[in-house]
Image (cartoon, helix red, strand yellow):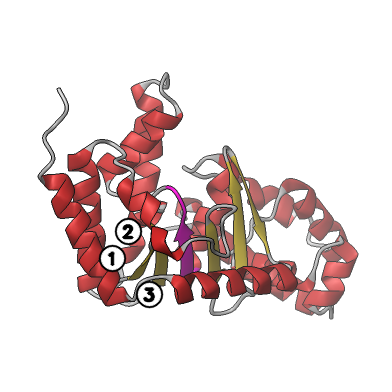
Amino acid sequence: MTGPKDLDPSSRRVMIGEELRHARERANLTQQSLGELLFVSGSYVGQMEAGTRRILPDMAKCLDEQLNTGGFFTRNCEKANRSKHPEHFAEAAEAEALATTIMEYGAMLIPGLLQTPDYARAVFLDYQPTAPDEVIDKLLSARVERARLFDNPTTPLLWAVLDEAALRRPVGGPAVIAANLRHIADLVRRRRAVVQVLPFAAGGHASLHGSLKLMYFEDAPPLTLIEAPATGRLLDDPATVTRHQLSYDLLRANALTPKQSLALLDSVAQDYAHEEPHP
């Protein structure tokens, strides 16, 4: 029989989250009251219990002290926090795997979940032009693994708004970007994603500051991700999530319809396919 030591990190986090819920209930504490003891929100406690948020070392120690759990969280959270993803994105990638709905706006690049391996490799090489092959290969392996959530025929629901700039920027060259656009069109035709393109003609819009990502869960509050080069933060503040949802709704309202967007994806991919390769 497979034992706990064989669990992957995300499964281990879910198990630890269940233990946290049981320990909190034994202590007759609500999520809100435990959050007050830990100086975090009740929704943050809910996300730890659902496995969508990591229990970091300082937090694990506080949980053991407040819930009298004999060092359980301190002992187990280190293994649960191991990840194949860069540290600044690890928590977001793990939450992504548990989300029921993901809404994402790609400003300058095709979002990671929609990238082909060749496109992703080109992005990593552009970002780290002197990195050795083993570093690029490790990043690529983690990126490809993220996309396996599409193996499930129904969940999560992915709704992506792509800025036209992401389509027109030939990352990796014409052949690579053409293949990636065809890949996205295929996901749309298989009804695995809803994709809209925000055209240049739309002018200014609600997310000129950059990309946007929202994640929703069956048994935990929603999260929004704020990213910058080599850094990222997951936020659960209801006011911030609501503001980002409004921004996303405005993006969708100004974007082409899904049918128009699919036609544009096909058209731009065909244009790239007919380009002569550069010597």
Secondary structure category for the residue under label 3:
loop
Answer yes or no: do the residues labelled 1 and 2 have beta carbons within 8 Å?
yes
- Which quadrant would the N terminus be assigned to in this image? bottom left
Residue depicted at 78% across the width and 76% down the height: 31
Q: Which residues are magenta?
A: 99-108
Can I make out residue 100 in this image?
no
Quote the CA–CA distance across marks 2 and 3.
Answer: 11 Å
Disc 2 marks a residue whose amino acid type is Arg
Return the mark for residue 151: 1
Counting other residues with Cα less than 10 Å from the Cα at mark 2, is it few (<14), some (14-19), or many (20 or more)? few
| Residue bearing the label numbered 3 | 155
Secondary structure category for the residue under label 1:
helix
Out of 100 and 51, give the one closest to the viewer: 100
Residue 44 placement, left or right of 109: right
Q: Position of residue 73 (x, y in %)?
A: 71, 55
Image quadrant in which you'd find residue 182: bottom left
